[in-house]
Image (cartoon, rainbow, N blue to C red):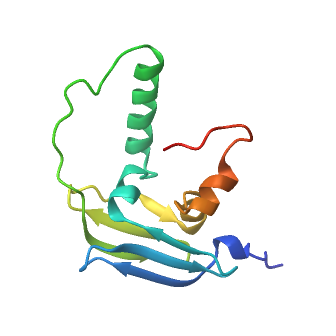
Amino acid sequence: MSMQQDARVRPSSIKIRVSTGDGVDIVWSDGHASHYDFPYLRDNCPCATCNDERERKEREKAGGLRSDLLPMYKPKVKANSAAAVGNYAIQIEFSDSHATGIYSFGFLRGICPCEACRNASRVPGERASA
């Protein structure tokens, strides 16, 4: 028995523009188009190390600690390379040497940064962020 994959998470076209630095463009089987720039993908890396770091920052923030008092300058992250992971994901090596995140198509669709997706995921009554 074969499971039907949701068209929302099945790409019909993927363009990863490493050499130009333009990012990743995906057209999904349901016709929706998503654009992800590399800094956005790096900031949303799904690997365990990055998840732990985001959780730590949230705990510090909730505890009243400020970890951003003396932010360090970081150059804009770029992609050095990208590769397909089976039929379900892409993996990107970033200019900061980070390469452990595997971006599944379901994850990418879930973090689509377009306005329509941001509005759809907003909690009713929540104000739009500026």
Q: Going 38% across and 50% down the picture, which residue do you hit?
A: 43
The answer to whether 82 appears left or right of 69 in the picture is right
Residue 75 in the image: state x and y as whole percent.
Answer: 17, 53
Quadrant of residue 57 within the rendered picture:
top left
Q: Is residue 65 above or below residue 58?
A: above
Q: Which one is in front, 27 or 54? A: 27
Q: Is residue 71 left or right of residue 45?
A: left
Q: Residue furthest bottom?
A: 13
Give the camera-side residue of 73 and 42.
Answer: 73
Q: Residue 65 at what x, y percent from top left?
A: 36, 16
Q: Is 97 displayed left or right of 67 in the figure?
A: left
- What x and y, as percent, mark residue 111? 55, 57
Q: Is residue 106 among the parts visible in the rendering?
A: yes
Residue 18 falls in which quadrant of the image?
bottom left
Horizontal side of residue 68 vs 5, given as left or right: left
Give the residue drawn at x 30%, y 24%: 67
Residue 61 vs 118, above or below: the answer is above
Q: Is residue 85 visible?
A: no
Q: Is residue 109 above or below residue 17?
A: above
**Number of marks in the image?**
0
Name the foreground residue: 31 vs 85: 31
Residue 27 picture location, percent across and down: 56, 80
